[in-house]
Structures are given as structure tokens and as C-alpha cells.
Image (cartoon, rainbow, N blue to C red):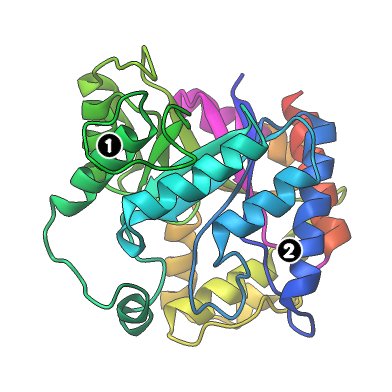
Amino acid sequence: MATLSVLDLSPITQGSDAARSFRNSLELAQRAEQLGYRRFWLAEHHGMPGIASAATAVLIGHVAGGTRTIRVGAGGIMLPNHSPLVIAEQFGTLASLYPERIDLGLGRAPGSDQRTSRALRRNLSSDPDQFPRDVVELMDLFSDEPQQPVRAVPGTGLKVPIWILGSSHFGAQLAAMLGLPYAFASHFAPAAMEQAIALYRSTFKPSAQLAKPYVMLGFNVFAADREEDAAVLATSMQQAFVNLRTGTPSRLPPPVPGYRETLGYQERTMLDEVLSCTAIGSPDTVRRSLRAFIARTGADELMITCQMFDHTARLRSYEIAAEVIG
């Protein structure tokens, strides 16, 4: 059976603020550690009113400092927003503070709109080879004897585990070529999932970090003790996703019973497509969905994400996911 981990966006709910989100993220990480989840990852997004994890490395330090054994990392750092040296120093610092507990997942999307991306980076490279070069440079900075003249202090020799994140064939090919573990964003972009993981597995080249392919897949779980409660709780994320796709991103709204019935055909179809890797329901329903997904994909690990307005209900959802997988 696949290992379970947590992806948290540190959601900011309507009527709340980032400070509350950070307290909730730490409490969720502590509960996930008790439940046996392997990792707790946070994602870099910028300019999103409902996501508080923009300063991802800072928040990773907050969570790692409040937990003891669970691995904490980035799912991911959007490397085009940063120089490899800065990321090596940040994650070298984290790995020095919390040895053997820090992961570094790397993505090539900006995690923001074009204006925010330009404010972050000042210039937007259109070179498709820049991301692979930056990944290789970052890997070199963590090595025992970097080939480049600069050094990451701390960072050099720490061998922080690097993952490639993606939602297309590009990331799959890069992860396979470099012999790195691959995390696919099937929780919101499932269209190319099966082709991407097949390509990754078939072209994988062993490396010093990894001897054989290792696939992690994102999966949404909205679980509750009663089927009807789970369906209502899931509407917060559905509303937020529709708002994002229609150009009006928002803080995570409270659930609305019957929300899907208020949507037009196009919006319902969009939700069905992008959230096809999702389980909504009671423990029995979630158990069947998770086991069927694992059997279909052969995933080594699932990164469970759950955007719920009510923090207590979100904790319970993660409890149910851990219970049904066992």
C-alpha cells in the first residue's frame, strides 16, 4: 500500500488571516506526525488571497521546529523565481537545523500571475533549458565538491533530497534523466498523469540519490463521518477553484450546501475534469477511492491535500484518510 503524506497550502479562510493559517498548519503537521504521515509539504504561491505559504522556506522552518520526526519540505519551490544559490543556502540552513528531515521539491511554474512573476524575478526567461540548468546547478551546490566556483554556506555536502514536480511530460523526462523522484500534480491537473508517469518509469536512469523510479501523486480527500457532510465540506474548495479559474481568486469561502447545483454546465465540467483525482465521502467511500487510485497508478506515495473551511473538520479528514489506508 502506498505511503501517505500531506500537502498544505496554509489556506486563509474568509474572516481569518495568515497568522491563524500558520497556527493551523502547525497543528495539522503535528497531527499528521501522530497519524504516521511521512511528509508535510508546503507550496510556493504568490499574490493569492487564499494561500499563506508564499515565504515557503520560512514556513517550513516554523513547521519543522514544531514537530519531531515527520519530514518537512517544499511541494514545491518554484525555481524560476529564485537563483539556485539562494535556494541552496535556504535549504542548507533548514537541513542543518533539522537534519534528515528536509525535502526540496522543485517546479518550473511561476506560482503566480505574470505581473507578480515579473515583480519577483524582474525578467522572465523564455529559454526552455533554463529550468533543467538551474536544477543541475542546485544539485551541484549540495554536492561534496561543487564544480562551480561559488559555495552555498550552509549547503555544500548536505545532499538535501531533491524532487521534480510537474503536471506534464517535461517534468517526467527531467526527473527520469536526472534519476530523481517525481511528484505529479494530479490533484488539480490530472490530464497527462498516466502518460507522464509511464514516461518517467520507462526512461528512468539510476542516480546517486535514487536507484529506481519513485512516483508520488497528488490526491484530494474530503472525508467526514457522514457522506452528506463530506459533500458539503468539499464545496469550499470547489468555490475557490471556480473563483480562481474565472479570474477572481478569493480566500477560502465557507461551504455552501448544494453549491454544484448552482453552477452552469461549463463550470461543472471543469470541476469534474480538474478534480477527477478526488475522494469525497464517508470512510468507506474514501477507502474505495484511494485503493482504486493506487491500484490503477501503482503510486509509491500519495500526497493528500484537503482545502476545508473548518479546521477541525480538516483534521478529521486527514484522520480518516490515515485510518482507511492503515
Residue at x 64% of width, y 51% of height: 60
Relative to residue 174, is residue 206 depicted above or below?
Answer: above
Which region of the structure is painted magenta?
A: 288-310
Q: What amino acid does circle 1 point to?
A: Ala
Q: Are marks 2 and 1 in contact (CB under 8 Å)?
A: no
Disc 1: CA contacts within 10 A as few (<14), some (14-19) or many (>=20): many
Magenta highlight on residue 242: no
Relative to residue 90, is residue 289 depicted above or below?
Answer: above
Left or right: residue 251 compared with residue 19: left
Give coordinates of residue 292: x percent, y percent. Answer: 56, 30
Left or right: residue 113 compared with residue 62: left
Tell me where residue 17 sits by quadrant.
bottom right
**Label for residue 14?**
none
Q: Nearer the viewer, mark 2 or mark 1?
A: 1
**Residue 177 visible, this angle:** yes
Give coordinates of residue 298: x percent, y percent. Answer: 46, 23
The residue nearer to you, when weighing 317 against 210, is: 210
Residue at x 78% of width, y 39% of height: 32
Quadrant of the snapshot with the C terminus: top right
Q: Secondary structure at mark 2?
A: loop
| Alpha carbon distance from label 2 to label 1 | 30 Å
Q: What amino acid does circle 2 point to?
A: Met
Mark closer to the chain start, 2 or 1: 1
Tally of marks: 2
- What residue does disc 2 label? 308
Q: Secondary structure at mark 1?
A: helix
Residue at x 63% of width, y 29% of height: 99
Tell me where residue 290 sits by quadrant.
top right
**Label for residue 172?**
1
Give coordinates of residue 127: x percent, y percent. Answer: 11, 59
**Residue 186 visible, this angle:** no
